[in-house]
Amino acid sequence: MDLKPSLARILHGLLVLSLCIAGMKTNAIFAEQPSIEILTPAEWEQVDDSVERALTWLASKQQRNGSFPTLPQGQPGVTSLCTMAFLAHGHIPGEGPYGAQLQKAVEYIASCQKQNGLLAVIAPRGPQISRNTAHEIGVSSVYNHTISSLVLSEVYSIQGPLEAARLQAIIEKSQEVSLTMQNWPKAKKVDRGGWRYLHPFYDVHSDLSLTGWQLMFLRSAKNSGFDVEQKPIDEAVAYVRRCFNPEYGTFEYTAKTPDQRSRGMAGAGVLALAHAGLHNSVEANKAGEWILKHPFDKYNQIETFTQTDHYKDRYHYGVFNCSQAMYQLGGHYWKQFFPRTVKTLLANQRPDGSWPPENHIAEKKFGNAYTTALMVLSLGAPNQLLPIFQR
């Protein structure tokens, strides 16, 4: 199957229309639906052309072992994001123009799993997870593990029985280690239900960024037919809600701690609640309004939204989270957010189809396969081809 994004958007629009005609949705609910009419057909063609150039560029950068270029400590997370970018636009491993390359990418991701279940190139080895590790490894290994587990679960969901024998055991082992990390002792009650780094880091043992990714993985695994208990998901959602700060009307990086606002965390909170079916929660709606007040018009500029200069925004990660989040909110959130974001992204795409590396010092080192994948995923939010992001 090679379902074109334009066809996917048309089918989605027809589905919404048919449900309304059938009287299956109230006017209030329908008003929140994300519209595909926010861009003209010509503008959608520009988006599709932009995405195709980006995917062509990404495909040209794939390494012989199936990975996409980044530092070793960014693998296989960056390769997973690149793979997900193709999946979000209708390309499937083993089929179509990128089928062979995507198959190699999936095989590379799967090959990175350690004996202890972690999906990361650089991570503690051995039969059990060791928490005695350097800070950089403790951070990167959990991000790699979670993002890669999510992508393998999505591939499993899309291809079903074709991938069962090869990926089932890997996903089950990934799930086991993720739940182990969630259940590690927390220094503070407010951190219960969340995830943080592999190593203990001060007395903050959960953060919204990693919790959002882990929650996506568990939801994806559950949707794919894996045995995932509801309790871990409920506890993760409870932690996400504790990260909402009513004083500022948005989500923060950690719960009940000094001001740590960012666009990335605003989007992560909204998206996490959407995965729990809480599309119209007070927290999500207020965070959506906060996002509208802090658009992405200034491309790749480091922004600070806190009362201090300590916590800075990551541009591309923020665009990705907010694009998915605003689609989930729909209505005026989507209508006001997406067109102006598209305008900025298309204006700053390089002639070769890529986007520049992240300006934030913590993420610049991962290169622009990473940022290009995030931008392709952002532009693909309305396609609804990845099960985990379907509304």
Image: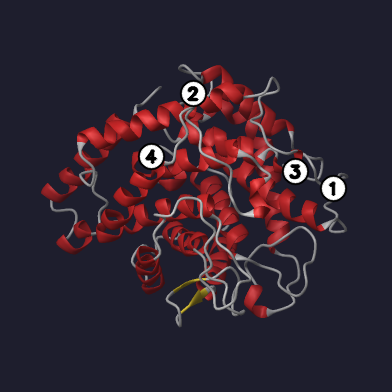
Gap between marks 2 and 3, in whole Å?
25 Å
Q: In this view, does 25 lie above or below 167?
A: below
Three-letter code, disc 1? Pro
Q: Looking at the image, which residue is at 36% across and 67% down?
A: 293
Frontmost of labels 2 and 4 is: 4
Instruction: Locate the N terminus and report the quarter of the image it occupies.
Output: top left
**Which of the two residues, 288 or 272, is positioned nearer the viewer here?**
288
Specify whether residue 183 is in view: yes
Does residue 62 appear left or right of residue 288 in this picture? right
Q: Nearer the viewer, mark 1 or mark 3?
A: 3
Q: Earlier in the sequence, mark 2 or mark 1?
A: 2
Which tag, 3 or 4, sits closer to the chain's start?
3
First in sequence, mark 1 or 4: give its number. 1
Q: Are marks 1 and 4 in contact (CB under 8 Å)?
A: no
Q: Which of 62 and 383 is in front in this view?
A: 62
CA separation, marks 1 and 4? 40 Å
Q: State the residue position of label 1.
A: 124
Q: Which residue is labeled 4 in the image?
A: 346
Q: How crowded is mark 2: few (under 14 residues within 10 Å), some or many (20 or more)?
A: some
Query: Identity of the amino acid at label 2?
Result: Thr
| Location of residue 62 with respect to 11 vertically, above or below | above
Q: Is mark 2 on a helix, strand or loop?
A: helix
**Disc 3, SS:** helix
Kindly report which numbered mark, 1 or 4, lies closer to the viewer in this rendering. Answer: 4
Q: At numbered mark 1, what does the secondary structure look like: helix, strand or loop?
A: loop
* Figure check: 303 above or below 365: below
- Residue corresponding to mark 3: 73
Q: Name the residue under label 2.
A: 56
